[in-house]
Amino acid sequence: MTDMFEGVPQEPGAPKPDPIVTADKVHRHFGGLTAVDVAHFEVQRHAITALIGPNGAGKSTFFNLLTGFDEPQTGEWMFNGHSLVGTSPAKIARAGKVRTFQLTKALNRMTVIENMRLGAAQQSGENFFRALVPGTWKAQETEITDKAEVLLKRFKLWEKRDDYAGSLSGGQRKLLEMARALMSDPEMIMLDEPMAGVNPALTESLLDHIVELKDEGKTILFVEHDMHMVRRISDWVVVMAEGKIIAEGPPQTVMSNPAVQDAYLGAHHDTDLSEDAS
Amino acid sequence: MDILLDSINEMIAPATAAFALAAIGLNFHFGLTGLLNMGHAGFMLLGMYGYAISTSRGAPIWLALIIAIVVAALFGLLLGWPTLKLRGDYLAIATISAAELIRYLGRSNSLQSLTGGSTGIRGNDFKFTFEELSPLPDENITFLFWTRHGSLSSSWWLVIVSWAAVALFALLYWQLARSPWGRVLKGIREDEDAVRALGKNVYSYKMQALVLGGVIGALGGVLWALGNSVQPDSMGRPTTFWIWTLLLLGGAATVFGPIIGSMVFWMALVAVKGIAGALIPTSVLSPVEIEPFSLVLVGITLMCLVVFRPQGILGNKRELAFND
């Protein structure tokens, strides 16, 4: 357990010493079905926080709410002290909180390098009138391309530079999406199931990349099913079930919390149902 | 030989250029941004009305052109405002009905004094400002095998201006498609949410593309009207579908696709008509039946194209094909 979580109580909604994201009374229901009902939630800056929970726990919906892709009926949530209520996903991204998607959204019919360039913020040639005068954006484009190439080398996608993103493997697309998100130098990166559909051979390098991001001072929040990954890289784990946060704690101990075991495995998880047990 | 010369004549005709220009506009919508605009003829018709009505009321040519552009831009804004926040199919439904609405409004009796109702506006009422600008002599001119009037109606003057306009806007497409602005549009074509997650205002970009393509469509309409007349029923749904056909034929998301597509499409139609007329005896197919018959043949050819070469003549299958 990292020092920054020293003294943080291991309970749902625990206050953190230096929160980058806070959320209060966030409630989202679809018709009569409550998807998310979070009383209080904080994410510690410069740490890797995992958001886990069984299927249908509301993790992805909560994730969408935090990134502006969905709007709750009630609630208040802040990023770096600024309220994000009613803010568009694009503005949230520009504020320094960038996300990736569970179903990877590599832009398939664009090349890898074009994908990367698109990730850059403040390319003035993205304005229609400036686009007509290449002189106003060519220099910036060179800078952006240099930066993209450094990231492509780091994420081992350099050989794929001019290939269409659609020709990459599932794991490479995850890497591309992560690298693309880094183009805008975000403060915080939100990864929605970064391991889903990734070939085991790539898993280790993907994990190393995520840890490296933390070492660079970025904050990471990710949703994941893969417990191996959660145990290996996260500093803090938040467990959701039925829309609520039911437990928080360091990865080594949170899984032994009885509330978590019940949520995951049902109340009868100790009962052996296999044939040779009878 | 006559069939060949007629076909080539059709290939360079002002109407072919007008359709090529309209298709360049649609290429901004569909090829670059992925917007399903099924009412492109509506933009063309609005441009025609804007130009013809203001000219017949005494506006100079530059003002008439500006009015045509502004009307089309306003139409784009109005159409995009409610629909661009929704999924792509809604834009298709909204545009097809909006284009029909324009046509029905244009041909309604209550607007007779403005639009001329279903008979439209006669060429003589609005072509003169353009024809007065012609530097060519006021007589029939024969160039190689083809004879056209120098300045009147479907003239050499109109041929030159039309293809110059097509070249200009093809250049514009080329420049914008390779700019960072065009890159954002391509990203939107691939996945809106991904582009949103990268901090771009998707709604604004889609609106810009819709308005720009619509304005280019309106200018295509003006060119078409200068070679014919303003007639609302000539800008119905079939016109929109022809533009789609020739864009996909040439290759969407390419610079020359709309141009090659328009040339091949109209040339093929004349060639098929000519050959069918020469080879099939009138006892089998009467001259009146030749026209629909050649459209059927062209239709079959296009189906084959979609099956065997879905990216069109010039398109890149990995970037944008018809059937994926």
Image (cartoon, coloured by chain):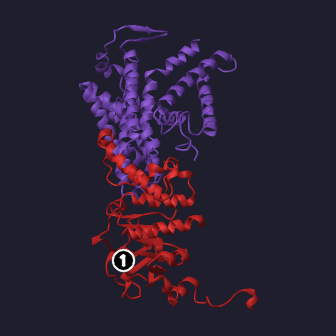
Chain colours: A red, B purple
Say which chain tag 1 marks. Answer: A
Name the residue at 34% across, 50% down.
Answer: B204
Q: Is residue A11 above or below residue A46?
A: below
User: How many residues crowd around disc 1 within 10 Å: few (fewer than 14), some, or many (20 or more)?
Assistant: many
Q: Is residue A94 left or right of residue B302?
A: left
Q: Amino acid at mark 1?
A: Gln
Name the residue at 43% across, 52% down.
Answer: A149
Name the residue at 43% across, 76% down.
Answer: A36
Q: Quadrant of the N terminus of chain B?
A: top right
Q: Secondary structure at mark 1?
A: strand
Q: Is residue B309 visible?
A: yes
Q: Which of the 4 image quarters holds residue B181?
A: top left
Name the residue at 38% across, 26% down.
Answer: B223
Q: Is residue B180 above or below residue A270?
A: above
Q: Is residue B29 above or below residue B268?
A: below
Q: Picture coordinates of residue B275 (x, y %)?
A: 63, 18
Q: Which of the 4 image quarters holds residue B48?
A: top left
Q: Which residue is mark 1?
A: A44
Q: Which of the 4 image quarters holds residue A228?
A: bottom right
Q: Is residue B37 visible?
A: no
**Which sits in the foreground, B116 or A164?**
A164
Q: Picture coordinates of residue B124 (x, y %)?
A: 33, 19
Q: Picture coordinates of residue B242 (x, y %)?
A: 51, 33
**Which sits in the foreground, B235 or A10?**
A10
Q: Picture coordinates of residue A264 (x, y %)?
A: 55, 82
Number of marks drawn: 1
